[in-house]
Image (cartoon, grey):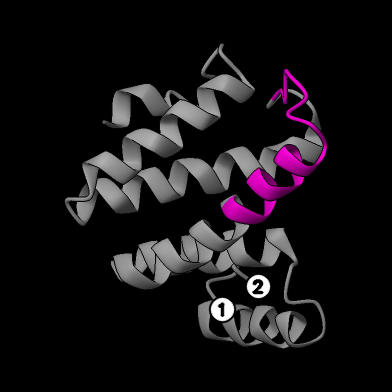
Amino acid sequence: MLAAGETQIARDELQWLLEDCHDFLDAHRLLGEIALVDEDFSLARGHFGYAFRLGQRAIQQAGEPRPVSYSLPANRTFHESGKGLVFCLVRMEKRDVAAEVVEFLLRCDPSDPLKVRQLI
């Protein structure tokens, strides 16, 4: 739907998915990306932030295993959501919070595959 330019349909479908599975990280990431296209940084921050915090909580509950590598497909949505969150926070002039997110992402994968360090 997104590739075909059907943004509103994609948004509606993703929101429908979240009704039954509110913690669906991929849906939040995609909604964040849609909000970025619309330059709605507050909404994008909300979706990216929710996905990032869910991943962060899962990592903490698992005893802070390291690394949480971006190279593993299961970890990509977490890292991409974190990058989106940092981007939004910087745009909203919340650099201190953005720096905290970057710090956590770098502890997870010090290789900084998404270049989040450069965003702040």
Position of residue 20 in the picture relative to residue 41 (left or right): right
Q: Which mark is residue 6?
A: 1
Seen from the viewer's position, the closer of residues 117 and 2 is 117
Which corner quadrant holds the N terminus? bottom right
- For mark 1, does the 10 Å Cα neighbourhood hold few (<14), some (14 to 19), or many (20 or more) residues? few
Position of residue 90 in the picture relative to residue 29 (left or right): left
Picture coordinates of residue 17, whole percent (x, y): 76, 81
Looking at the image, residue 1 lies above or below residue 19? above
Q: Earlier in the sequence, mark 2 or mark 1?
A: 2
Looking at the image, residue 15 lies above or below residue 104? below
Q: Is residue 55 magenta?
A: yes
Q: Secondary structure at mark 2?
A: loop
Q: Residue at x 69, y 38 (%)?
A: 76
Q: Secondary structure at mark 1?
A: loop
Looking at the image, residue 34 lies above or below residue 103? below
Instruction: Tell me, yes or no, if residue 78 can be seen here.
Output: yes
Which corner quadrant holds the C terminus? top left
Position of residue 55 in the picture relative to residue 21 (left or right): left
CB atoms of marks 2 and 1 within 8 Å:
yes
Instruction: Tell me, yes or no, if residue 3 can be seen here.
Output: no
Q: Which mark is residue 1?
A: 2
- For mark 2, does the 10 Å Cα neighbourhood hold few (<14), some (14 to 19), or many (20 or more) residues? few
Q: Quadrant of residue 59?
A: top right
Magenta residues?
Answer: 53-69
Seen from the viewer's position, the closer of residues 104 and 92 is 104
Question: How far apart are the alpha carbons under marks 2 and 1?
Answer: 5 Å
